[in-house]
Amino acid sequence: MFDSLPAVLGVVALLGSLAAAGLALYLSVAFLRPQRAARSAEPDVKPRPGPTSESTQDSLPSRSGNGPRRAQAVTAHSLFVIFPEPTSETQADVVAWLRKVEARYDSVFEVFNVAGEQPANPIKVANAFPPGTLPDLLLSQGSNGFELRGLSLLVKPPLRRSRNQQMHVFLALARELEALGGEVLDADRQPATEQTYERILG
């Protein structure tokens, strides 16, 4: 009997340690499960990176006008010169003016081009009534029976403000036509003002 007592005590001790380990495992699982559930319930919010200087520059208009992108960039400047009482003399004066500014007729688009200071970006002279094409007024044929009531002047703005020489030529042409008896209107068909010209010059 006494020989088997140590063995019995060893088995009891082993069972006790196993029970203690099982209890510890149970308590740890029971304690950690609510914490994991709480963590999974929290929204996974990751801080969003703020806008970089490059994206801000693209989305905002450049104050200097020299940025890579400009908000609501003007594709072309336009002025309209209307002759309230057109006569044959008025048309003859316009023809003489076209020769003086060395306008070249574009037979494809049926408009005149004035090279000005930047031949790569010519100023276009078109018909205002109705808007569109003009006959070659420098030739007698093709312009017979045509009544000139007004002209449209169009030019693309420069990419940089420092290169606005053509804008000065554009306004000078409008003033010369005004001196021939025309009324200069802006793109909204309102009388052009000094503010209109300042906006065109940038």
Image (cartoon, rainbow, N blue to C red):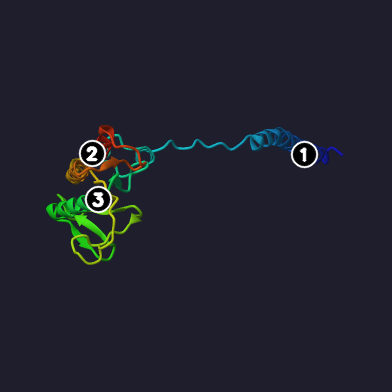
Identify the residue position indicated by label 1 in the image: 10
Disc number lying in front (3 or 2): 3
Q: Which mark is residue 194?
A: none
Q: Residues within 10 Å of mark 1 (few under 14, many from 20)?
A: few
Earlier-in-chain disc, 2 versus 1: 1
Tell me: residue 58, above or below residue 91.
above
Lateral position of residue 133 relative to residue 37, left or right: left
Task: Check disc 2 and give the amino acid type.
Answer: Leu
**Which residue lies most toward the left here?**
100
Pick whichever of labels 3 and 2 is earlier in the sequence. Answer: 3
Chain-order first, disc 3 or disc 1: 1
Q: Residue at x 21, y 61 (%)?
A: 105
Distance between mark 2 and mark 1 Cα atoms = 103 Å
**Quadrant for the C terminus in the image:** top left
Which residue is pictured at 18% across the width and 55% down the height? Answer: 95
Pinpoint residue 6: horizontal percent, then vertical percent: 79, 38
Label 1 secondary element = helix
Circle 2 SS class: helix
What residue is rendered at 17% in x and 56% in y? Answer: 103
Q: How far apart are marks 3 and 2 (CA)?
A: 32 Å
Q: Residue at x 28, y 34 (%)?
A: 193
As drawn, 2 above or below 117: above
Q: Can residue 114 be seen in this view?
A: yes
- Where is residue 39 drawn, in percent x and y? 64, 35
Q: Name the residue under label 2.
A: 201
**Kind of residue sitting beneath label 1:** Gly
Residue 87: assigned label:
3
Marks 2/1 in contact by CB < 8 Å: the verdict is: no
Left or right of residue 80, residue 177 in this image: left
Residue 94 placed where, x, y %?
19, 51
